[in-house]
Amino acid sequence: MNAPTSITDLRKIAKKGIDRADGTTLKMIVALLNIHDKEAEQETAYEKEMLKRIDDYEKGRIVPISLEDMEKRVRDNHKKRIQSQK
């Protein structure tokens, strides 16, 4: 049997399978759909944030820093945190 190649074919097969599925299988399908929805929401939020940051950069609202400067800031902050814990 050849694997279905079109979305339409896949939907037809899935709908037939859902009609015959038991409760456990239906719960798994719903769980997968919920995971897909959450991932899609996260991707959308990520994309919006990235577009906002690109826009902020292009409009001069943020100034990028080099990797070296970022690493130095992280090291300095870490040292300060360790010293404050003493």
Image: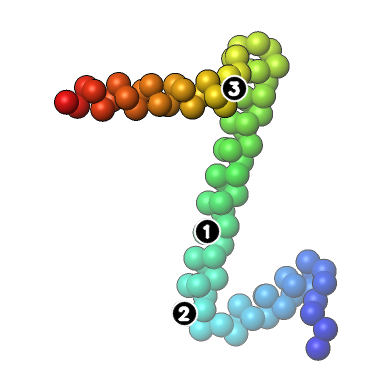
Give the secondary structure at mark 3.
loop
How many residues crowd mark 3 within 10 Å: few (<14), some (14–19), many (20+)? Answer: few
Residue at the extreme top: 60
Task: Please tell me which of labels 1 and 2 falls first in the chain.
Answer: 2
| Residue type of the residue flagged with mark 2 | Thr
Question: Disc 2 designates what residue?
Answer: 24
Question: Disc 1 designates what residue?
Answer: 35
Q: In this view, does 32 lie to the left or right of 58?
A: left
Position of residue 24 relative to residue 8, above or below, is below
Residue 11 image position (x, y, % from top left): 73, 71
Spatial separation of the CA atoms under disc 2 and disc 3: 52 Å
Q: Which residue is drawn at 60% across and 14% down?
A: 63
Task: Please tell me which of labels 1 and 3 falls first in the chain.
Answer: 1
| Residue type of the residue flagged with mark 1 | Ile
The front one of 54 and 43 is: 54
Residue 45 image position (x, y, % from top left): 57, 38
Question: Disc 3 designates what residue?
Answer: 66
